[in-house]
Image (cartoon, coloured by chain):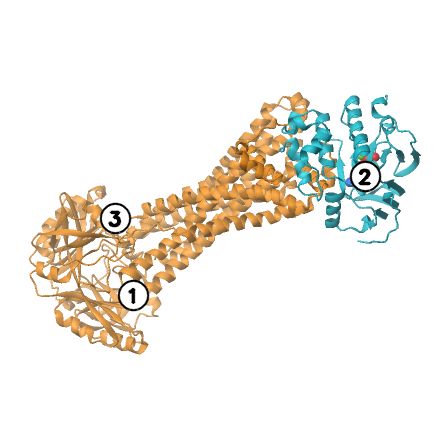
């Protein structure tokens, strides 16, 4: 080991606390990168494998009913490699021992196993056998939740008939990697299941002999960018059969959520490490500049002894690089650990045949390279300062800096009111510009991370409140398989415990506005509906007008519609005339692209008597009434789905909020490391630089707390200024996140309340104070008498 | 605090068999051995001795910067050797003024502000500008230390020390970093202060010539007092020759 290296080693070990602060910031940066980039790969590769394994569809077309022969025409379209007709229905599931009727999606599969589009991966039991018709394969999560085993019988209500089905196996499928029921945003495996039945049985049960109501298709290689065109053609072919929706893989719910998560990981794998490593570079910069200044005479002596510029330069650079290596090593270990935690978090939401955290050597090497680069960047200024020194000049102590006044002093009335303590603090802060800037930068980044975390939580809460407390207010929603007449409302009103029943009419169809088109639907509500209340941006109720549509902002954007415009709408069912409908209100919505209208207006347009496709119920809170209600619903005619808002909200809060808390805790921890590390670094350096000054103050009769308060004030100014600057940055970050995640399915509200700012500010101050505890301890320990006598 | 009035009123500070041993790991250095002495109110006491003889140690103990290992120190009726660190802080704050060889001014504060650092926390302070007038620096009060010469900086340090109206002014080689002429000027200032304000002053120096300006001279060698000399006719600083 060379003498210089030995010097380096001693310097490193002598300021261990300081280095720990810096190294932990770097480690967090590298850990963020490793864990997020690893998970990006874990998910990306798991997805690719899974999609290939299941032969994931590139598109699907949902229609009312079409003969198989005509569906085959879609397979002949240019660019389409292969199609599969499928029968799919929503059904209710009656589980013994579970009070509430549950919802399910029933899908047909070939009677005999063959590799088909959107195939299943069996987890337990087997595929269908030849022994009986009524066999069912249940999706694994639902089965696990209800402890269903192959060999057990369950009841599905198919086409109004209660069918007894034998479970032969459990399975998962790539189209349900993120298993969503209709209208849901998080999986709810307790209340929603997927049930695969034999194609032959489905044809019988739904009266679909030689017909299907869905086409799944795969495109020829290289046709991915022309999906839209292909779907348009297919839709034209199938138009006579009433096309409800055409869904490219891009818009398939599960794929959409999964892909967005993967994209989000990729973005965060850049942004978060950039923040932390940026702060680390700034902090190293401060430390090394100080070291270079402190070691002027040493540098001069080394140069006088004949060490070359390059040797001295690399010696200083090495100081930073050592930090980089240690930071990267710690970060690699932490990142691998965090990566595992993140992966298991994903396993709660996403279902894959296997999703494991892997050790990606190249990512760890990249992490090391980034860490070294940022350490080198941080060291550069200090190391360069050393270069410029001439030996003779370097051996003399640094000439005292010319004192001069700072900007603030021009505000005379203010300055004269300040105590000398404040003047010392302010001059020190304003003159050590680089250090103050580095501290403020770190605080800004820490505050941005905190604000972003809090805003994500508040956004999630707001979204749940807005959609499921304010817009949707019913306790139980019934969806009918086919439209029913007014009598269904009376039946529902008569159910046990029902205080209020309101009819709902959902009409699927196409919207058109000039060149803009969109598939969707209109929800008919009664005038003064109390159980579904569309709201504006400020969450104020928008009354349903007698005439015209209340359109969600997202759909209005897609169609380029403004309030007062007229859109065209072609219902998928009925007469299928194009109707010209005025958009009278624009409502806010964070989920889907709903459009509301008066139900009588809708019925009139469809030239029908009052019809309804569902009923919303407000019930009392009596659990016995609720049990009785569920009991009767199990035999309620023509029921396709039963939803309980309380169950849904409970599930949302449980899954979303809980994982949010984990994230917020991690954010707080990371931000804490940034605040703590940078403040400790700046204060300890300031303390070291001013040992003599502090000793003088102690001689004059200042106590250790008074001396500490000077350092505290200095760090608090930087912290508060930085945090204030960081809060809007955090807001911007949340806004960017929301924009990045915005889709037709889902939009994230950007919500910041005074609580956001107060919590961020309070935490920033709390971190500052706790870092100061260490500084105060160092002040108490400072051997000021020695500092006083040392001849600098 | 003890209140036994053992000291006669003329005695401001009394050392009784004070010893001080520094231990650094294995090595123990006996900096002071059995030092007994009295400092009278309103006198200038010079402490002479070669480097390492314990002069600074005496001053630090007298000023409450450090504590003795053995023996007792009395300030008026208070036993200084029993003071807690917090009490010592108060003692320094209210009673003692310090002047050092290397001035120890706060670089980020102007001359006036350096004086204010001391007046802001003391109980009966002088007006900072008045203190600077005493050292004839009122025109330079808005200058920063880096803009002043060594002698000027030392005068600011003296102004800072005397601005709190200390009962005791302790100067550790106040002229050590100054040229001879400037040193004499600083000495003149200390003598004037004593005459005008009746401040008790202890000056440490290794320059025997400068000590002629004191009322009493104590000579130290290897941590022990080897000679106490009462100077019946102190030489005015201007007349001191090398
Ligand atoms: N903090 C300390 N630790 C160890 N030894 C010390 C310390 N302060 C002073 N000494 C020793 O005590 C002796 C007297 O020192 P000091 O009072 O500073 O001498 P003077 O001021 O007369 O030059 C010297 O030998 C010195 O090395
Ligand atoms: Mg000395």
Q: Give the number of the disc on residue B59.
A: 2
Task: Tell me if residue A639 comes above or below residue B146 in the rendering.
Answer: below
Q: Look at the picture and state if A791 lies above or below A465.
A: above
The chain carrying label 3 is A
- Alpha carbon distance from label 2 to label 1: 81 Å
Q: What is the quadrant of the N terminus of chain A in the image?
A: top right
Mark 1, Cα crowd under 10 Å, few <14 / some 14-19 / many 20+, is: some
Q: Position of residue B129 (x, y in %)?
A: 67, 33
- The colour chain B appears in is cyan
Disc assigned to residue A250: 3
Q: Residues within 10 Å of mark 2 (few under 14, many from 20)?
A: many
Q: Residues within 10 Å of mark 3 (few under 14, many from 20)?
A: some
> Given this view, does label 2 or label 3 mark the residue nearer the observer?
2
Query: Can you tell me whether the CB of the residue at mark 2 lies under 8 Å from the nearest atom of ligand 1?
Result: yes
* Residue that appears at 56% across and 39% down: A323
Mark 3: secondary structure? helix
CB contact under 8 Å: marks 2 and 1? no
Q: Horizontal and vertical percent for residue B66?
A: 78, 44
Residue A645's disc is 1
């Amino acid at each position: 080991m060379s003498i210089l290296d030995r010097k380096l080693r001693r310097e490193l070990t002598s300021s261990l606390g300081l280095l720990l602060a810096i190294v932990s910031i770097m480690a967090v940066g590298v850990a963020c990168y490793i864990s997020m980039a690893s998970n990006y790969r874990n998910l990306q590769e798991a997805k690719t494998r899974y999609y290939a394994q299941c032969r994931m569809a590139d598109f699907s077309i949902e229609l009312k009913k079409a003969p198989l022969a005509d569906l085959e025409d879609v397979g002949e379209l240019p660019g389409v490699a292969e199609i599969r007709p499928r029968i799919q229905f929503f059904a209710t599931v009656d589980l013994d021992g579970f009070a509430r009727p549950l919802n399910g999606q029933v899908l047909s599969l070939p009677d005999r196993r063959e590799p088909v589009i959107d195939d299943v991966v069996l987890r337990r039991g087997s595929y269908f056998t030849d022994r009986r018709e009524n066999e069912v394969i249940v999706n694994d999560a639902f089965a696990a939740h209800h402890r269903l085993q192959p060999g057990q019988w369950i009841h599905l209500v198919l086409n109004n008939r209660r069918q007894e089905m034998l479970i032969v196996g459990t399975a998962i499928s790539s189209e349900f990697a993120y298993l969503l029921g209709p209208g849901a945003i998080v999986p709810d495996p307790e209340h929603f299941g997927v049930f695969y039945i034999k194609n032959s049985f489905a044809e019988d049960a739904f009266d679909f002999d030689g017909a299907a109501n869905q086409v799944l298709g795969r495109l020829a290689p290289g046709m991915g960018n022309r999906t839209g065109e292909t779907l348009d053609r297919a839709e034209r072919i199938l138009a006579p059969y009433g096309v409800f929706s055409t869904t490219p893989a891009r818009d398939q719910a599960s794929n959409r959520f999964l892909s967005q998560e993967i994209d989000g990981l990729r973005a965060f794998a850049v942004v978060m490490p950039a923040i932390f490593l940026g702060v680390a570079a700034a902090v190293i910069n401060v430390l090394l500049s100080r070291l270079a200044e402190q070691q002027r005479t040493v540098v001069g002596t080394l140069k006088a002894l004949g060490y070359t510029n390059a040797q001295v330069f690399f010696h200083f650079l090495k100081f930073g690089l050592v930090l980089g290596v240690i930071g990267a090593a710690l970060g690699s270990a932490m990142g691998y650990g965090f990566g595992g935690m993140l992966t298991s978090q994903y396993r709660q939401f996403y279902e894959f045949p296997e999703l494991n955290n892997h050790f990606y050597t190249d990512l760890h090497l990249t992490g090391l390279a980034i860490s070294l680069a940022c350490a080198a960047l941080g060291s550069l200024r200090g190391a360069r300062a050393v270069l410029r020194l001439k030996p003779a000049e370097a051996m003399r102590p640094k000439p005292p800096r010319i004192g001069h006044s700072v900007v603030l002093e021009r505000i005379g009335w203010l300055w004269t009111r300040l105590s000398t303590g404040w003047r010392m603090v302010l001059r020190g802060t304003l003159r050590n510009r680089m250090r103050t800037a580095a501290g403020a930068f770190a605080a800004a980044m820490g505050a941005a991370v905190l604000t972003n975390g809090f805003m994500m939580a508040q956004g999630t809460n707001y979204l749940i409140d807005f959609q499921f407390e304010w817009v949707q207010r019913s306790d139980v929603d019934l969806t009918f398989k086919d439209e029913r007449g007014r009598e269904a409302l009376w039946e529902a009103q008569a159910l046990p415990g029902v205080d209020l029943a309101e009819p709902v009419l959902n009409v699927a169809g196409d919207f058109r506005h000039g060149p803009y088109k969109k598939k969707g639907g209109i929800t008919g509500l009664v005038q003064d509906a109390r159980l579904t209340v569309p709201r504006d941006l400020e969450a104020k109720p928008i009354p349903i007008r007698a005439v015209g549509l209340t359109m969600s902002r997202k759909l209005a954007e897609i169609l380029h519609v403004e309030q007062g415009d007229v859109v065209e709408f072609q219902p998928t069912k009925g007469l299928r005339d194009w109707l010209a409908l005025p958009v009278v209100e624009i409502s806010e919505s964070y989920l889907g692209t709903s459009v509301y209208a008066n139900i009588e207006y809708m019925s009139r347009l469809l030239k029908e008597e009052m019809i309804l496709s569902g009923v919303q119920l407000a019930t009392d809170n009596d659990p016995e009434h609720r049990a009785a209600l569920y009991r009767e619903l199990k035999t309620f005619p023509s029921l396709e789905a039963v939803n309980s808002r309380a169950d849904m909200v409970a599930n949302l809060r449980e899954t979303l909020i809980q994982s949010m808390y984990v994230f917020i805790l991690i954010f707080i921890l990371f931000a804490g490391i940034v605040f703590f590390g940078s403040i400790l670094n700046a204060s300890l350096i300031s303390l070291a630089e001013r040992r003599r000054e502090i000793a003088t103050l102690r001689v004059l009769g200042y106590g250790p707390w008074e001396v500490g308060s000077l350092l505290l004030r200095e760090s608090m100014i930087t912290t508060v200024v930085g945090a204030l600057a960081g809060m809007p940055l955090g807001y911007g970050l949340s806004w960017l996140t929301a924009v990045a995640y915005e889709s037709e399915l889902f939009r994230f509200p950007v919500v910041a309340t005074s609580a956001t700012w107060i919590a961020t500010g309070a935490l920033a101050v709390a971190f500052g104070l706790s870092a100061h505890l260490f500084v105060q301890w160092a002040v108490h320990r400072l051997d000021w008498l020695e500092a006083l006598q040392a001849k600098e | 605090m003890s209140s036994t009035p053992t000291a006669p009123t003329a005695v401001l500070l009394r050392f009784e068999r004070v010893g001080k041993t520094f231990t650094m790991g294995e090595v123990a250095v006996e900096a002071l051995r059995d030092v007994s002495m009295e400092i009278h109110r309103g006198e200038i006491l010079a402490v002479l001795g070669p480097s390492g003889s314990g002069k600074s140690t005496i001053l630090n103990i007298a000023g409450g910067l450090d504590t003795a290992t053995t023996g007792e120190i009395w300030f008026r009726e208070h036993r200084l050797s029993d003071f807690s660190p917090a009490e010592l802080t108060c003692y320094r704050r209210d009673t003692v003024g310090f002047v050092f060889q290397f001035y120890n001014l706060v670089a980020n504060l102007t001359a006036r502000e350096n004086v204010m650092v001391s007046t802001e926390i003391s109980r009966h302070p002088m007006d900072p500008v008045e203190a600077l007038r005493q050292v004839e620096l009122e025109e330079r009060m808005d200058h920063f230390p880096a803009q002043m010469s060594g002698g000027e900086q030392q005068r600011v340090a003296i102004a800072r020390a005397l601005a709190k109206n200390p009962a005791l002014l302790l100067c550790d080689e106040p002229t050590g970093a100054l040229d001879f002429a400037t040193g004499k000027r600083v000495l003149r200032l200390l003598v004037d202060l004593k005459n005008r304000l009746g401040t008790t002053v202890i000056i440490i120096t290794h320059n025997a010539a400068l000590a002629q300006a004191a009322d009493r001279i104590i000579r130290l060698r290897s941590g022990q007092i080897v000679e106490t000399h009462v100077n019946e006719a102190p030489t005015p600083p201007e007349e001191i020759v090398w």
